Image (cartoon, rainbow, N blue to C red):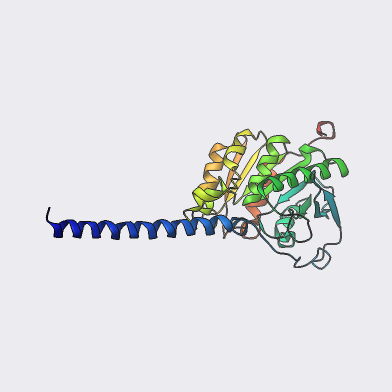
Amino acid sequence: MSSFSKYFFRKKVVVWKIIAGVICGFAAVILIVVWSLQSEMIYNPCPKLLCTPEQMGYDDCDVVDFKTSDGETLKGWFFKTSHEPSIGTALIFQPTSGNMSFAFDWCDLYLKNSFDVFVFDYRGFAESTGKPSEKGLNLDALATYRYLTEERNIATNNLIFTGRGVGGAVATKLATVHSPALLVLEGAFVNLPEVKSNLVPICKYTIWSKFPTEDYIMDVHSPVLVVHSPYDRLVPYEHGAKLYRLANDPKEFLEVNGPHGDAPIASYTKYRDAITNLYVVPNDDDLVKE
């Protein structure tokens, strides 16, 4: 090899090293940014309630607060149905955006069909104390369950756990420990990194919170209703289809209309019918107190 060729070869090596260094540096910056912004990517709480039940015309609603096992104080609303007698209570696990004042349409789906409803704010949302995390949200779920069963004396098999998005994972994990009369998953995902990677592909490998609904659902032995829309752009339809395949019998898959979170309005009638078909009203002798 001539001296000129050697010189040219060395120059190419230097250039490629510089390019490789720039690419690695750029990738490292992206990883650092994604890692540092994970909390904001997962949790988007609205610090103030948009309105209160009273302002929305709900006459029979208790505003409550209760403690978690690690000392946080959570706020919640317990709605009594006006369609007496009540046949059960729906415990709503929201997605990790907004707060409980975003859930009135969801509450109405149950209230209009003789269910009482309990909706609450996770830690760090609106007036609830603390900072949200995967472990924290699961502790919040246990606290809501204890509040309903111990303070309000509601039987476990008189409860519906219903969750959307991250709330679906939280509700499903709770259902592996305490079996409700029905588990309803609306717009739920198989796991958090998988769904976030639809927007930012690198998230599949960098999100530390997993919320693995796909793992939990195989250990649920309550009836399961999976609700999903093919028009859901936040959680692709395939997530709901996979959760349905993994769920134990009895189970039902309900295809609904509208974007993510719109099912209680866009598909009210068939959503209501699917719930009432799967929910079995327990006799007084069959109520399970844990």
Q: Position of residue 225 (x, y in %)?
A: 63, 43
Residue 232 seen from this side: no
Q: Position of residue 19 (x, y in %)?
A: 34, 60
User: Of 199 and 234, which appears nearest the observer?
Assistant: 199
**Position of residue 62 measured from the top left corner of the image (x, y, whole percent):** 86, 56
Give the x, y percent position of residue 73.
Answer: 82, 52
> Would you say 250 lies left or right of 15 here?
right
Q: Quadrant of residue 77?
A: bottom right
Q: Answer above or below: position of 124 versus 190.
A: below
Q: Specify the quadrant that holds the C terminus.
A: top right
Work out whether 130 lies above or below 253.
below
> What residue appears at the point 19 percent right and 59 percent down from the top-left corner?
7
Q: In the image, what residue occupies the spot 82% across and 62% down?
A: 58
Q: Nearer the viewer, residue 215 or 163?
A: 215
Q: Residue at x 68, y 36 (%)?
A: 176
- Left or right? Give the position of 170 relative to 34: right
Residue 89 shown left or right of residue 235 in the figure: right
